[in-house]
Amino acid sequence: MLINADFTRRAALAPEHYQWVPSPQNGVERVMLDRVGAEKARATSIVRYAPESYFPHHMHPGGEEILVLSGTFSADDIDYPAGWYLRNPPNSGHQPYSKEGAVIFVKLWQMPATETRYVAIDTNDGANWQTQHNREVCHLFSDDSEQVSLQRLKADEALFTDAVFTDTIKGGAEILVLDGELIDAELADNAKTYTRGGWLRLPVDVIPQIKAGVHGATVYLKTGHLSKVIGVKTEEK
């Protein structure tokens, strides 16, 4: 299965165009944002757990990255309410479930085999935020190949504002709108607006014209991670 599998091209999905697809487990469905492979795939998805739904214990040979968007996601008897960011390194395993229901952003098979760090960060905790270049930033993960953060933009503020931010997207960028709205002015006469749940993926060496709407925006931002990804040009749904 190939979905948005050409990583040399822009990809985007607005929440009004979500298509929920059942997973192999009852009560769990997903929106496939990009995917290369069948059930065990390099994949980026929005996953929705119905109340009292679960997955049996399973392994993640290629690692797993999670941001809890709503509800409470649980794994191995630990609860993670909305706002928690998790990284489970390659060859880790867990038994995920949700008692009340949850929606999570998930990335699978996108970590190097050498990654060993477990990460669990509560982005609701103000102590995890800092001011960087006059912007509030919550740093989530960083290594030689990628940088992950949450960023709060003021009204009409450009996402990539100066040499510091534009330099970070030479290796590509991925954005998920968590609050407010983003305006993508790639085409000046046809700007697109992405509200909460909107997702964009930008190829390497692109400096996009993206800014917050009139009420600002909070976004998940990952940069640098596409520099070694080979674009698969044959697309199928």
Image (spheres, rainbow, N blue to C red):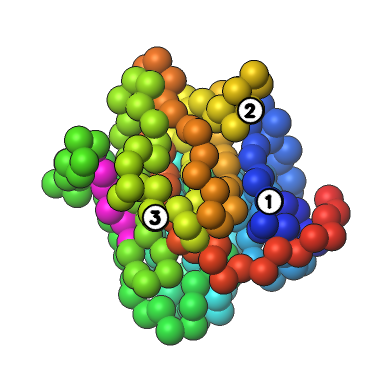
Q: Nearer the viewer, residue 182 or 70?
A: 182
Look at label 2 and name its amino acid. Leu
Left or right of 164 on screen, residue 175: right
Q: Which residues are magenta?
A: 136-141
Single out the mark in the foreground, 1 or 2: 2
Residue 9: mark in rendering: 1
Please report the residue visible at 47 percent of the width from the left and 57 percent of the height from the top. 170
Whether residue 137 is visible here, answered yes or no, is: yes
Left or right of 198 on screen, residue 163: left
Q: Earlier in the sequence, mark 3 or mark 1?
A: 1
Q: Secondary structure at mark 1?
A: loop
Q: Earlier in the sequence, mark 3 or mark 2?
A: 3
> How many neighbours does mark 1 have within 10 angstroms: few (below 14), some (14-19), or many (20 or more)?
few
Q: Which residue is mark 3?
A: 168
Please report the residue visible at 40 percent of the width from the left and 36 percent of the height from the top. 159
The quarter of the image holding the N terminus is: bottom right
In the displayed structure, would residue 194 be above or below residue 207? Answer: above
> Residue 129, located in which quarter of the rendered image?
top left
Q: Nearer the viewer, residue 227 or 162?
A: 162
